[in-house]
Structure formats: structure tokens, C-alpha cells
Image (spheres, helix red, strand yellow):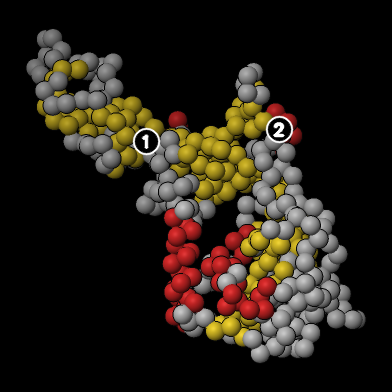
Amino acid sequence: MRRALAVSVVTSALLGVLACDRGGEAQTRPAAEGAHSDSIPDADHGTGGHDEAAPHEHPAGGDDHADEASPHTHTAEGGETAGAISLSPEGRANIGLETVVVKIRPIERTLALNATLQVDPDREAFVSSRVQGKVTAVRAKVGERVAKGQTLVVLQSLQIAETPPTVEVPSPLDGVVLERTVTTGETIDATKSLLHIADLSRLLAQAEVYETDLASIRVGQMARIRVTSAPERIFTGRVVRLSDAIDPERRTLRIWIDVPNTRDRLLKADMFAQVSLVIASSGNTVAVPNEAIQTQGAERFVFVQNGDKLVKQNVVTGERNDQYTTIKRGVVEGDEVVTRGAIELATLASQPAGGGLQDESKPHSH
């Protein structure tokens, strides 16, 4: 609801600067035949897209990707750019408009998994004293970074028949204090855990894979990890370990993915994460970022930069993963499509001021 309100506010602001090009006949292109599924494969099936249409049409004498370096325009039958949106620099800034160049790239098949970030057991330590004593000072607080060898706790030994020496308890590794269970003045023995220290420069993402997908999983596979606290960041990791036992009730196998953290430690222990595990790669094909694809009913379209205009262009989509969608017809390599701001443009296109943007039914020519 908040997003809809935000789009409404942006739309109202942009309609004041919108100038639609109505000089030509409405731009027309073939509609996609029926509804298309471009959802990310789920963990049970991992299915890709459907073979929905013939290849993108090019001028006679060319092949599927003939001379993509030459200029490519999206025009109506009369040769003039139609159904286009013109935005002033201010209007573009208001929606944070960004574009990318369409490329031919391999499309990876991915398996979507839910995961929890955990401290690597080989990168953590529970600090204790080797002698019984009375704590005289605690020199570390929860959340503080400590260095290997740094004094964390000072105590006076209470061992019998000895002059009470001062004992310093050092940190066994570089890391962060996750937990503190000791206070000044407390009497402790060698069995008490005083501090929990962990190196968070790398974490483990623990995920569960259904038994039916196990044939696709192996150590060393690359994974992309996303967390809700940093939705625009993609963290990469690799599978480092597989469990040897299936959960008898859930019919799943645990896997662990090693994930390097950022310098400012954006990833935290016990965070929930979404994992896209790369399990295969298809051949090279025309593909665009997922955020470029907009939908309206069965129609799928993108906005193409054509000179100083933004032209709505119907597309036929194929396979889709967590990053890219393959395009079977509608745009070609070298076209420039809108990514950020595409939702706002789709809203503008649906307004009466969008004019010819509604008519996309006639053949599309290049």
C-alpha cells in the first residue's frame, strides 16, 4: 500500500512535466501469445521458462544477431517514433531513472533456498580462565572488536599456598564480543565461560535442500545471498559442506555456504537470508535484468531508450533466474532498456496522457 501511494505521488509530480509525442501514428507491435511464466523456480522443481515464440525478426539477409553494432530503433509503420514518453531531466531525476544496455549472456539455472546466517564454529571461541580467581577488571564489552592476544579479563588467583598473582585472560582470536557473562568482583573457576568471541569476517549460510533436488547439489557451487536489511546488495558464496543425513520428517538435507562479510559487517549472525544456488548454465541468449520487465495482464513489456524518448516495447520472455530474464522477441543486443524507474513509467503509460502507448497490437519493425 505504501508503494502504491509512493508511485501515485511520483506519478502526480511527473504528469506535470510529461510531454507525450503524439506526432506519429501509434506504435504497434505483436502482443505476447498468452500468459507467460517468468517466476523464479521454486526449491521443489527449479523449472525454467517456456518456449513461447519465434526468434526476434531482423531485416532480410541477416542472422539472429546480425550487425548489432549498427543503430537500432523502435518505430511505428510510418517510420516515426510513436507511443513514446519524453521526460525532462527533472522528471528523470524524480524517478531515479537508470538504463542498461541489452547484452547476450549465459543464463544460469538457480535453486531458491531459505537460509540462516551462522557463525563458523572454526572462527569462534568461548573464553575462560585457567585458574580460579576473583575478577578485578573486564576490559571488553559486547559488540566491541578485539584483537588476538588483547587482555579481556584481569583476576586475582585464589589458589591455596600461592601469593595471589594477577592473571590476565587474553583473546584467542581477532573478532567481536558476542556475549559477556562475567562482572567485576565475581569469583570464577576454570569451567566458567567468560566471553564469547567470534570472527565475523566470514559467516556460514545454513540452508535445507529437498531430497528431490540433491542430484543438482555439490560442494563448490556458487550462490548469491540476499538479506532484507540490504535489499540492493548481493553477497556471493560457495557451498563448503553437505550433511550426510536426511531429516526424516522434512526430507531435506542441510548444506552450508561460506559467505564473505563486508568490511562494515553488514551480515549478522542469525540473520535470515535468501539464497539463489547456481546449479546449471544455459547457452548465450539475449537477456535483460528482471526489474526491466513490466507486466499488465498477459502483456509483458520494457521501456527502450530511443534518442531522447522512452518507448514502450512488448516482449516475449523465456527462462528467468534471480537476476535476468531471457528475451525471445521484442529487443535485441545493444538496445538500452530502463531498469530503475520502469514501474513509474508503466504507471505513466497507463494514464490517458500516455496516448499511443496503449496500442501495441500491430507488427513491430526495426
Query: In the image shown, does 160 or 210 lie closer to the viewer?
Result: 210
- Residue 294 position in % (x across, y down): 63, 63
The answer to whether residue 220 is above or below residue 91 is above
Measured Cα–Cα span from mark 2 to mark 1:
31 Å
Residue 174 visible from this viewpoint: yes
The answer to whether residue 34 is above or below residue 11 is above
Query: In the image shown, does 256 or 275 lie closer to the viewer?
Result: 275
| Residue appearing at x 53%, y 37% in the figure | 115
Circle 1 residue: 198
- Residue 311 position in % (x across, y down): 65, 77
| Residue appearing at x 68%, y 66% in the figure | 301
Query: In the image shown, does 320 or 21 lie closer to the viewer?
Result: 21
Could you tell which of marks 2 and 1 lies nearer the N-terminus?
A: 1
Q: What amino acid is labelled 2 in the image?
A: Leu
Question: In this view, which residue lies farthest toward the right?
Answer: 61
Circle 2 residue: 214
Question: In this view, which residue lies farthest toward the left?
Answer: 163
Quarter the C terminus occupies: bottom right
Q: How many marks?
A: 2
